[in-house]
Image (cartoon, grey):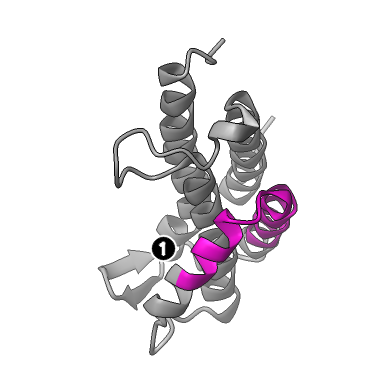
Amino acid sequence: MSQSIQQFLADSTKQAADELLAALKRVPEDKRAWSPMGDARTALDQVAECALLNGWTADVIRDRAWPQTMDMEGYVREKARIAQNPQEIEALLEGSAAKAIEAILGLSNEELGASVETSFGSRTWLQMATYPYWNMSYHQGQVNYIASMLGCLK
């Protein structure tokens, strides 16, 4: 059975979102906003990042363009707001993952190798489509590490 790279990334993005939420749920509710070392990031902060950047990446892919300006201050404020509202996190992550999946599935095979200039250099659309899966997988490890420090990783 052959599967397109777009379908593989869509399925992997969904799985990564599910696994990131499962990792968050391993952390006791009263420790989800806990920082393991002073300024270290909390579990909620990391999941809030993924929720925001999934949607942002979906917009870039949908528009087939990197934004001319980036409001980093707005991003930081919104991430902090989301992290302080844990009841929103699950719905926001699931919604942004679905938005990313839709954008990924909208890429044609011919577009995958085409490049877009970003603030971080040239990236192919395939690299952009991989970002939500990669970022959530990375942060799943970080959240699981917090759970392991708390003795909650099973």
Please provide percent x and percent y for residue 16: 59, 38
Q: Which region shows up in magenta?
A: 77-101
Residue at the image position 49 percent from the left and 34 percent from the top? 140
x and y percent of residue 36 in the render?
A: 36, 33
Most prominent secondary structure in the magenta stretch? helix
User: Which image quarter is the C terminus in?
Assistant: top right
**Measuring 44% from the left and 17% from the top, which residue is drawn there?**
148
Task: Name the image quarter holding the N terminus.
Answer: top right
In this view, 36 is above or below 10? above
Query: Does the stretch in magenta take in 121?
Result: no
The residue most toward the left is 121
Q: Quadrant of residue 56?
A: bottom right
Is 45 on the left or on the right of 73, as rendered?
A: right
Residue at the spot 54% in from the left edge and 15% down from the top edge: 152
Question: Foreground residue, 103 or 112?
Answer: 103
Q: Disc 1 marks which residue?
A: 113
- Local packing at callout 1 (Cα closer than 10 Å; few below 14, some 14-19, many 20+) is few
**Where does residue 88 sit, x and y in percent of width and height?**
71, 55
Whether residue 24 is visible, yes or no, is no
SS at badge 1: loop
Q: Does any portion of residue 83 appear in the rendered image?
A: yes
